[in-house]
Image (cartoon, rainbow, N blue to C red):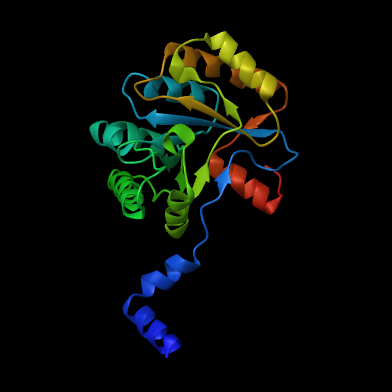
């Protein structure tokens, strides 16, 4: 009798069976590879003050990076989303309103995540499959919902803490250079909390690490490389 009732329930609500079988989204802080590749990532944008400067440095150095966008910022500055897409940067989600997803209900998590996906797609970006948790905070509920929605959660292995505005471009660049390793993921910010130090840091570290044999790739490229074990 139980199995009949369950089968009837799944026929009426097919999404439930899919959700129950979904695994929590994985948190990826670094790719497993021996190749000298690393990914630069930028959170909290776009902002008209800092995003164009970051894009200019990346384009001048022929580097692709990953931007985790906040929906409310993207809505105010849609031309910057268009520019990132045109420049073939990787676009990930940082939430519609940058809400911390820890200690939230499944419904609240889903609302924040799906709202931003809709915003970014409306502005011309591909449907996001990468999510960065505001504050790096998550719990089982958030990860389960993100898994159900097909996301991978991207953390970081090198934290520049540039949002605190307490260090120089040179110091940040030296930190990244010192901690660089194959598959590393570096976090910067290009939102309202960005700074000239952030721009200066990437101006310094990109050519330096290229001279050391590193290549800069998007998160999507990094994950594909890890999965396929192929060479860039």
From the viewer's perspective, is residue 149 above or below residue 102? below
Residue 200, position in %: x, y?
50, 13
Residue 214, picture quadrant:
top right
Residue 224 located left or right of residue 25: right
Residue at the (43%, 49%) spot, across then down:
142
Q: Is residue 136 above or below residue 162?
A: below
Q: Which of the pair 88/45 is nearer the observer?
A: 45
Extreme-left residue of the structure = 76
Q: Position of residue 70 (x, y in %)?
A: 34, 36
Give the number of marks: 0
The residue lying furthest to the front in this view is 1
Residue 204 appears in the rendering = no
Q: Along the line of sight, which residue is nearer the eye, 221 or 181?
A: 181
Asked if residue 79 is positioned above or below residue 145 in the image, the reply reads above
Above/below status of 59 relative to 92: above
Give the position of the N terminus as an image quadrant: bottom left
Give coordinates of residue 162: x percent, y percent: 48, 18
Q: Is residue 32 visible?
A: yes
Image quadrant containing the C terminus:
top right
Judge left or right: residue 58 versus residue 230: left
| Left/right of residue 115 with respect to residue 84 in the rendered view | left
For this orientation, the residue located farthest to the right is 34
Which of the 4 image quarters holds residue 37? top right
Residue beneath the point at 48% across and 10% down: 166
Residue at the (28%, 45%) spot, across then down? 119
């Amino acid at each position: 009798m139980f199995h009949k009732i369950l089968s009837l329930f799944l026929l009426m609500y097919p999404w439930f069976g899919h959700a129950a079988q979904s695994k929590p989204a994985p948190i990826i802080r670094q790719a497993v590879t021996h190749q000298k590749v690393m990914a630069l990532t930028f959170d909290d944008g776009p902002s008209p003050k800092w995003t164009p400067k970051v894009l200019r440095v990346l384009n001048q150095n022929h580097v692709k990076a990953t931007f985790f966008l906040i929906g409310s910022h993207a809505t105010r500055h849609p031309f910057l989303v268009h520019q990132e897409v045109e420049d073939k940067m990787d676009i990930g989600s940082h939430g519609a309103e940058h809400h911390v997803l820890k200690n939230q209900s499944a419904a609240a998590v889903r609302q924040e995540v799906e709202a931003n996906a809709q915003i970014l797609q409306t502005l011309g970006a591909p449907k996001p499959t990468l999510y960065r948790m505001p504050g790096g905070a998550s719990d089982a509920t958030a990860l389960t919902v993100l898994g159900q929605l097909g996301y991978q959660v991207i953390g970081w292995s090198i934290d520049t803490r540039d949002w605190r505005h307490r260090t120089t471009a040179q110091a940040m660049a030296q930190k990244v250079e010192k901690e660089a390793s194959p598959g590393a993921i570096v976090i910067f910010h290009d939102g309202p909390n960005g700074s000239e130090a952030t721009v200066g840091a990437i101006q310094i570290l990109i050519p330096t690490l290229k001279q050391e044999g590193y290549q800069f790739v998007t998160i999507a490229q990094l994950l594909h490389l890890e999965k396929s074990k192929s060479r860039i």
